[in-house]
């Protein structure tokens, strides 16, 4: 194999950024170019890339953030976009990048964490990471009905400024664990992944992100600066045929509705954490919108 070069933060190099995006599409079916063009790829997301002939062959990225758990704030580093081109696999490139990143950051943050798929569950414990379960919240809405009109599907391009405003002013409501500074990553989701799932409720000045699969409604995000409870939002959602709402965040209470919580270990999105005392992470749910 040719000699490779470690390059930190390739976003301003158009050729390397294009190569990075091609590898991300091949590996995860995601592309960061729209996020970059809109100005939301900022300095808190840093790729560490091995490069040969101006081509990204392997990468480990870090995202710097602050996570609030039970009103306590923690300095966090998330590892993500771990990928190696198929022609260069089995050369230990991901291991070397992980070692480099951990050596640089481990003493600077309270915790380092990541989400892994089922193919690499044995990889991250080699670096000291411990796998933890996450608290899944489901709400029984089988007896609830849509009571109000006013749910309007939105276009991100048209609502970009308003969505960014509400992200910066977000009221977390009854969510137990959330990010204190998640504008850039939130805008990644809204500008790419959530574009066909975002709706606006004018009466509540609220955006909701959801999709329906059979009798389940997956409520991805609730975006507003106002105080809110889930029962008020349900008045607007299309739940006539819905029995269960599943939330990728943990609610502390759900007045007038039956809520169930279960600690689950999901192999395709497994949480791994590195730190001295993992007690704060036991039985929590890191919101989907914070997954890098």
Image (spheres, rainbow, N blue to C red):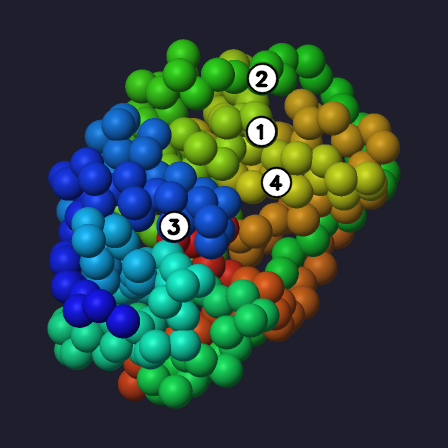
Residue holding disc 2: 153
Residue 77: image quadrant is bottom left
Dot 1: what SS? loop
Dot 3: what SS? helix
Dot 2: what SS? strand
Crowd band around label 3 with a 10 angstrom C-alpha radius: few (<14), some (14–19), many (20+): many
Percent position (x, y) of residue 264? 64, 70
Dot 4: what SS? strand
Residue holding disc 4: 219
Q: Residue at x 76, y 40 (%)?
A: 213
Residue holding disc 1: 197
Q: Does residue 162 appear to the left or right of 64 in the view shown?
A: right
Q: Disc 2 vs disc 4: Cβ atoms closer than 8 Å? A: no
Upstream in sequence: badge 2 or badge 3: 3
Q: Disc 2 vs disc 3: Cβ atoms closer than 8 Å? A: no
Q: Residue at x 33, y 72 (%)?
A: 94
Percent position (x, y) of residue 268? 59, 64
* Image: 90 above or below 182: below
Q: Residue at x 56, y 33 (%)?
A: 209
Q: In which quarter of the image is the N terminus?
A: bottom left
Q: Can residue 132 be seen in this view?
A: no
Q: Disc 4 vs disc 1: Cβ atoms closer than 8 Å? A: no
Mark closer to the observer (1, 3): 3
Upstream in sequence: badge 2 or badge 1: 2
Marks 1 and 3, Cα distance to the nearest angstrom?
26 Å
* Image: 185 above or below 148: below
Marks 3 and 4, Cα distance to the nearest angstrom?
30 Å
Upstream in sequence: badge 4 or badge 1: 1
Marks 2 and 3, Cα distance to the nearest angstrom?
32 Å
């Amino acid at each position: 194999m040719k000699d490779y070069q470690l390059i930190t933060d390739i976003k301003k190099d158009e050729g390397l950024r294009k190569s990075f995006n091609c590898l991300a599409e091949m590996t995860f079916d995601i592309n960061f170019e729209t996020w970059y063009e809109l100005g939301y790829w900022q300095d808190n997301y840093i790729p560490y890339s091995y490069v040969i002939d101006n081509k990204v062959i392997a990468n480990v990225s870090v995202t710097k953030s602050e996570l609030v758990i039970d009103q306590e704030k923690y300095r966090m580093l998330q590892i993500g976009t771990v990928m190696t081109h198929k022609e260069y696999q089995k050369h230990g490139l991901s291991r070397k990048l992980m070692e480099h990143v951990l050596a640089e950051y481990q003493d600077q943050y309270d915790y380092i964490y990541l989400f892994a798929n089922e193919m690499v569950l044995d990889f991250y414990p080699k670096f000291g990471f411990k796998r933890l379960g996450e608290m899944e919240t489901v709400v029984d809405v089988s007896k609830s009905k849509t009571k109000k009109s006013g749910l309007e599907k939105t276009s991100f391009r048209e609502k970009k400024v308003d969505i960014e405003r509400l992200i910066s002013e977000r009221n977390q409501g009854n969510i137990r664990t959330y990010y204190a500074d998640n504008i850039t990553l939130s805008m990644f989701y809204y500008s790419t992944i959530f574009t066909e799932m975002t709706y606006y409720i004018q009466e509540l000045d609220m955006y909701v992100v959801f999709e329906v699969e059979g009798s389940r409604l997956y409520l991805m995000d609730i975006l507003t600066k106002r105080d809110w409870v889930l029962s008020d939002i349900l008045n607007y959602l299309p739940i006539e045929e819905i029995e269960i709402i599943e939330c990728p965040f943990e609610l502390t209470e759900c007045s007038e509705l039956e809520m169930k919580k279960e600690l689950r270990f999901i192999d395709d999105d497994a949480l791994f954490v590195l730190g001295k005392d993992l007690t704060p992470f036991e039985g929590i749910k890191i919101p989907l919108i914070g997954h890098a």
